[in-house]
Amino acid sequence: MDNTPDKKLIHEHVIQHIDDAIANNWIKVYYQPVIRALTGQLCSAESLARWIDPELGFLAPDMFIGALEESQNIHKLDCFIVEQVCRDIHEHLISGKPTFPVSVNFSRLDFIMCDMLKVVETATSKYNVPRDFIHFEITESMIAQDEELMKDIIEKFRNRGYEIWMDDFGSGYSSLTLLQDYEFDLLKLDMHFLFTMTDKSKTIVRSTINMSKNIGIKTLCEGVETKEQIDFLYSIGCGKFQGYYFDKPQPYDDMLKTMEEKNIKIEERKWHNYYEIASISALDLEHPLEIVEYDGNSFHTLFMNDAFKRQISLNDKTTDEIDNIIFNKYSALVPKYKQFAEKAIASKSIESFYYTDMGNYYQLKVLYLAENENKYLFKAAITNISLEQNTKERDRLDSRLRELNHLHEVVLLLNYKENVIYPLLGGYIYADNLNENSDSLRQACKSFSELYIFPEDQLSFIDFMQTDVPVQRIIKDGQSFSKNVFRVKQKNGAYKWREFALVPIVGTDGTEFLFTISIIPEEVEQALNDKHSLAIARQDSKVDEQLTEYARLWYTLLNNSSHKFFWKDKDRRFRGVSKSFLDFYEIKSLDDIIGKTDEEMHWHVDDGPYQGDELDVIGNGKIVYNAPGQCIVNGVLRNIICNKLPIYENGEIIGLVGNFEDIDEEVFRIQRLMNPTKIDNLTRLMNNKYFMLTMMDYATQYADEGRNYAFILLHNVNHHRIEDTYGSNISASVLRAISDKIIDVTGQTAVASRLKEAYFGILTYLDSKEKLEKLTLKLKEHIEEINQVNGQSVTIKINTACHLRSEDGMNDEALYAKCLKDIEQIETSSEDN
């Protein structure tokens, strides 16, 4: 005999007992995990209602959802689910249990029967749940029934920092129109499309996912049940999976137990945005695409499409197997990949890298995507120039690239006619400018010289690289190439000798050259160092260590000090100047000043005082200290102060040495030291010290003029949670964002300061409590609108306190203490509840 209750009876029972079910917790929240495709980690879960009735037993959703919809009671269930999910998340947060975003299903009637945004905001505020931990699912049919209502709702929820997901995408007839007219964060596709896994169904899903990602919408496939479906969805770049393959809906603790048994880890909140960027960048395209992660030591491929695998001839391998082949610790290419990765990180733009491997030529293009805690994310494309379909490119490079990476650190293709650089190998090792997106060849050479070539070698290097010189020099010397050695700055700051060569490309009429930088043997480098040593030798060829040390010190001062040194011969002609001297006068080369006098440089209004001082120094050994003067620099009269001393040799004066400083610059520097800034460097509000001094000014105005003022104290309760989740850089950016919001509201009418941590104080002239409370509420609401900082989702919760100076029993000293005490009471009460 069938004891199953009649559907009509269940329908009536549900309607009659929905309030009892909520009050008595007959309705339970079950969770079904959502898995990120690229990492295999649990990244969120869907909340689903289950009714366990004392009379009817377990009721599945299809046994009560319809009844609640028809009776317009569905909002009661959905409001309860929102409350329960927020309570669960809160308990997990404070107990240290794994916590993750949860999606909640909404009905159209929810928005008709109540203010659902207010319900959600009340629950998230009550339980202090980050807004990015709650997502909301709506269906296409909901929008079709009331387009204007739903458009307004979607916009309001998203503006507050909640994600809106479209469930059952493709089940109606207007899906594409909805994507054009509405803003969604994620599309959920049901796997009924792939139930048969036909070529046609695969094409539909592939096209839908690509289309979604191309317009910036994330993707999730639900109803996933087989390994075959998982493999296919991963290969086409589907972002997330949900289905019985991973777990059925269960109570929270049971779901966690299943995840642990299946060795599925839970994605930490601080990695959510990082992997969302990776997920939305993974596309099944015709051209090669790889999403790869770099931690400063090793590489890990998150996604690689079939086109990329074909280019590297590893079609039948998994990404893990490919990583073991390409990025294993014994690979000679890994150091070059690392250098290239560092280049891409520095430039944040597309970088190209040509290299050879196993007889093939490759061009690798990489774009930096994101970083988090010393992990870096890249999108890469590769072209195997050796493949038949790339014969034109292969032939063009054949004579230029073959195995050059075994001979040289850097190989560039220089086109003097087009004034451009093409990096072939290692262009990233030294100069950040030398890439395909750099300025002109001439500008790149100049920048390279200034940044990386040893100062003494810079003029020779520029001469070596001059546009019209290479061919002439090569012809004159009867050589097939031109070469020279220069000292190049390394990452550790040391200079090492490197051999530079310019090799003309046959058939280009001297317009194209291979430019190479090569490591030279140690014994050759030592010989060059000996030749260029700063040591001063005696007659007996022994090196005087003290004089050598002095020479090095003087050389360092000339090239690195901010002091403007100069020295002259007995005729007052310049023998040399420091780099800072050249920079001050904006003189490009020593050749423009060596052998000239001050008068010939034409930079004094009155030459007399300078001539007199220098003649006294040279003629009778006078020492000049702090002599004031003036000089002209690019049409601007600058006030300077100068020192000059005689130079002796064997007791005879042979010249003078001196230095000078810009008086205006020195005064400004000293004023900065004597009068520290009033600004808090982090927030650009007034710092605590000067805010308290300003508070005394307000107190004086109140005492002398009777001008009433108010103090407002704001505290972001979630500051430490943000710092613990994302680190100090993001938490600092949040503080800066809060300060910007404060200025937006108060403008020029108030003084604001970050008093400590995430406490902000505001002083303003107001004459009523009503105006004060209105301003305080406006500040709170405006600040709490912040929901994203530097790409990371954040939830700001501001507690406030405010008092007028004129309130009974109030005095100037008590304002801050009273506000602080009020906030402490609010937060203590919140913790107790």
Image (cartoon, rainbow, N blue to C red):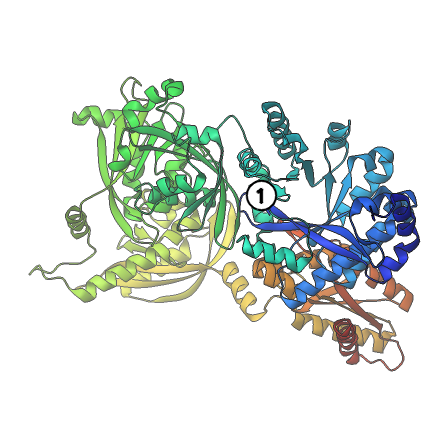
From the top left corner, tell me how far across and down residue 736 is, in percent: 65, 58
**Quadrant of the image occupied by residue 697:** bottom right
State the quadrant of the C terminus. Answer: bottom right
Q: Is residue 218 left or right of residue 459?
A: right
User: Which residue occupies 60% across, 40% down?
Assistant: 239
From the top left corner, tell me how far across and down residue 409 is, in percent: 29, 40
Height in image: 793 above or below 797?
Answer: above
Q: Residue furthest front?
A: 1
Mark 1 closeness class: few <14, some 14–19, many ≥20 residues within 10 Å: some
Q: Is residue 523 left or right of residue 273?
A: left
From the top left corner, tell me how far across and down residue 158 is, in percent: 75, 46
Asked if residue 536 can be seen in this view, the reply is yes
Q: Secondary structure at mark 1?
A: helix
Q: Nearer the viewer, residue 30 or 203?
A: 30
Q: Nearer the viewer, residue 775 or 424?
A: 424
User: Which residue occupies 26% across, 62% down?
Assistant: 647
Q: Residue furthest left?
A: 540
Return the residue at label 1.
277
From the top left corner, tell me how far across and down residue 222 is, in percent: 66, 40
Q: Is residue 266 left or right of residue 101?
A: left
**Quadrant of the image occupied by residue 402:** top left
Asked if residue 790 can be seen in this view, the reply is no
User: Which residue occupies 39% across, 51% down?
Assistant: 297
Residue type indicated by callout 1: Ile
Q: Nearer the viewer, residue 82 or 374?
A: 82
Height in image: 392 above or below 353?
Answer: above
